[in-house]
């Protein structure tokens, strides 16, 4: 999984069968310090992201599996989450404290 920042929209008049109606966005991949890496890429949007959003992306076969209706489409990069809040800790530090709370499995 990677981070990416949405930079714009890609508009296609003709698409591969099974990708009609799929929104394509132009994204800038980011490293763990939120700095741009590599070139702009086109990603399929399954989470209704918009320009400027920080998103979680997946590649390869997993990207094609993220499509709701069609599972065998030539998609190589997909946006699967919009980041609402991000907390980055310095390298080498971890928080092993279990917080009090409730989940459906306890």
Image (spheres, rainbow, N blue to C red):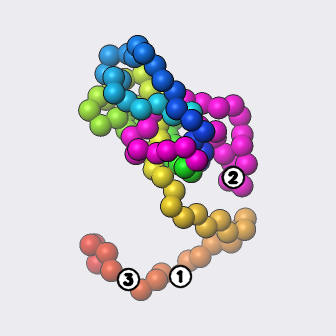
Q: Is residue 68 above or below residue 13?
A: below
* Residue 43 visible in the shown view: no
* Residue 65 visible in the shown view: yes
* 47 drawn magenta: yes
Residue lying at the far bottom of the rendered structure:
100
Sequence-first tag of 2 and 1 = 2
> Which residue is denoted by mark 3 in the rendering?
101
In the rendered structure, the answer to whether residue 89 lies left or right of residue 14 reads right
Q: Is residue 22 above or below residue 54?
A: above
Sequence-first tag of 2 and 3 = 2
Residue 97 numbered mark, or none: 1
Labels 2 & 3 near each other (Cβ < 8 A): no
> Which residue is denoted by mark 2 in the rendering?
34
Q: Is residue 57 above or below residue 40?
A: below
Q: CA distance from mark 2 to mark 1?
A: 26 Å
Labels 2 & 1 near each other (Cβ < 8 A): no
* 26 drawn magenta: no
- In the foreground, 45 or 56: 45
In the rendered structure, the answer to whether residue 18 lies left or right of residue 58 reads left
Q: Which residues are magenta?
A: 27-52
Which mark is nearer the camera, 2 or 1?
Answer: 2
State the image coordinates of residue 75 (x, y, percent, origin top left). Answer: 44, 27
State the image coordinates of residue 3 (x, y, percent, origin top left). Answer: 59, 47
């Amino acid at each position: 999984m990677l981070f990416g920042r949405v930079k714009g929209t890609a508009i296609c008049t003709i698409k591969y069968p099974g990708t009609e109606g799929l929104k394509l966005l132009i994204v800038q991949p980011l490293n763990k310090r939120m700095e741009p890496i590599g070139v702009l890429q086109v990603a399929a949007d399954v989470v209704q992201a918009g320009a400027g959003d920080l998103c979680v992306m997946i590649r390869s076969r997993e990207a094609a599996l993220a499509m709701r209706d069609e599972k065998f489409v030539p998609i190589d990069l997909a946006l699967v989450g919009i980041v609402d809040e991000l907390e980055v800790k310095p390298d080498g530090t971890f928080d092993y404290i279990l917080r009090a709370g409730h989940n459906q499995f306890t």
